Amino acid sequence: MTVDRLLFLVFAFVTCGSAIGVVLAQSVVRMAFWLVLSLGSTAALFFLLHADFLGSAQLLIYVGGTVVVLVFGVMLTASGSLPALRASAPELALSLLVGGALLFLLGTTVLAIPWVQVTDRQAPSPVLQDAARWSELEAISVASESLGVPGAGGIERHELIEQAQQQQGRSVRPLGWALLGIRPDAELHAPANAPRAAGYLLPFEIISLHLLAVLLGAAYLARTKRPAPASQDQFPAVKSL
Amino acid sequence: MDQVELQDFLLVGAILFVCGIVCMATKRSAIGVLMGVELVLNGANVNLVAFSRYTSLGLDGQVMALFVIVLAAAEAAVALAIALNYYNNFDSVDVDRGHRLQG
């Protein structure tokens, strides 16, 4: 039981338990709490998977943005007396049955595939690949220093340390390059006739325009439309806009 | 085994996905359905990042997961605006009372 496995078990249990808590909670506010817990421990799982920027983005955008917006929605749509919004028993039974069947299908599929054939044959993650490459370059540099030969491969030790320090934020720099359309993580050490890796400049621009459209659309859709009360109605022609 | 394997993360993703689907199917509050959608997208993200780490998918999985996060936030905002309009029209967020929206 390594620390890695222990951390994974803790965060996986919190994630799945909170997701079940979202399903079982009765009031919407409690569902929001369990959702915050689930999304937060999913961010921890992302950190365990060496996706540090993605874990931070998950915390910022999901926990700090989306759930807050959902709680605002709960606040704005709360009527006077909240009736117990519960599905009828046959609906519950049917959806639990379908959910259980889907979970069984997904679980047996995941456990039946010999993943070791896929994971062992391929190159490790870009973060690990980078770390392996820097450590092998550093080994060459140290070996050449001890022999009194200037850095083999033209790389000085201080340059290695500088580059290693720049790599502390491991996945931010490769992600930034990829969103600009350049893929140094895939193409820098690849042979010249290898197929080019995908750049993500076009999806980045599309996403930017999409966010702009969503900002305008949501602000327009959610504007206040309540009509003025009749006693104060100075402009009877202008009702709810 | 003392290492975390790929299938452990895939099982977590599957459980999140199924919880999201059951949440979408059983909740009568529109906001509850939105929370189910967030859980589904989260389960897909866990899958993407797990494949990015353990197979040759590499950085592509993380970029896709980033786009999924951005799109989920955008969709939550628009869906909430729709839920507010629904509340203004029907005076509750009960999705079962929206049968006049059909056709």
Image (spheres, helix red, strand yellow):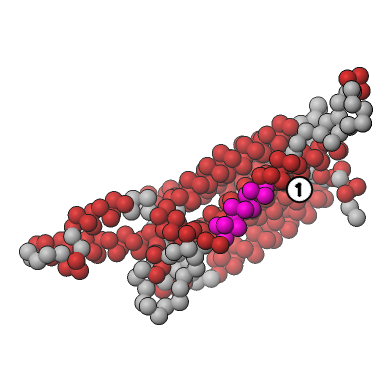
Q: In what quadrant of the picture does the C terminus of chain A appear?
A: top right
Location of residue B64 (image quadrant) = bottom right
Residue B4 position, x and y percent, is 43, 58
Instruction: Give left or right: position of A130 versus B95.
Output: left
Q: Is residue A8 visible?
A: no
Residue A187 position, x and y percent, is 39, 70
Q: Amino acid at mark 1?
A: Thr
Judge whether A207 appears above or below B98 on screen: below
Residue toward you, A159 or A141: A159
Magenta stretch, residue numbers? A203-214
Chain label for disc 1: B
Element type at marker 1? helix
What residue is shown at x 81% (from left), y 37% (from top)? Answer: B87
Q: Is residue A147 visible?
A: yes
Instruction: Give left or right: position of A37 versus B25.
Output: left
> Is the residue marked by circle 1 packed among few (<14), some (14-19), or many (20+) residues within 10 Å?
many
Location of residue B13 (image quadrant) = bottom right
- Number of callouts in the render? 1
Location of residue B98 (image quadrant) = top right
Q: Is residue A211 found inside the magenta-colored segment of the image?
A: yes
Residue A199 position, x and y percent, is 49, 65
What residue is shown at x 64% (from left), y 48% (from top)? Answer: A212
Judge whether A191 appears above or below A93 on screen: below
> What residue sits right under mark 1 in the picture?
B26
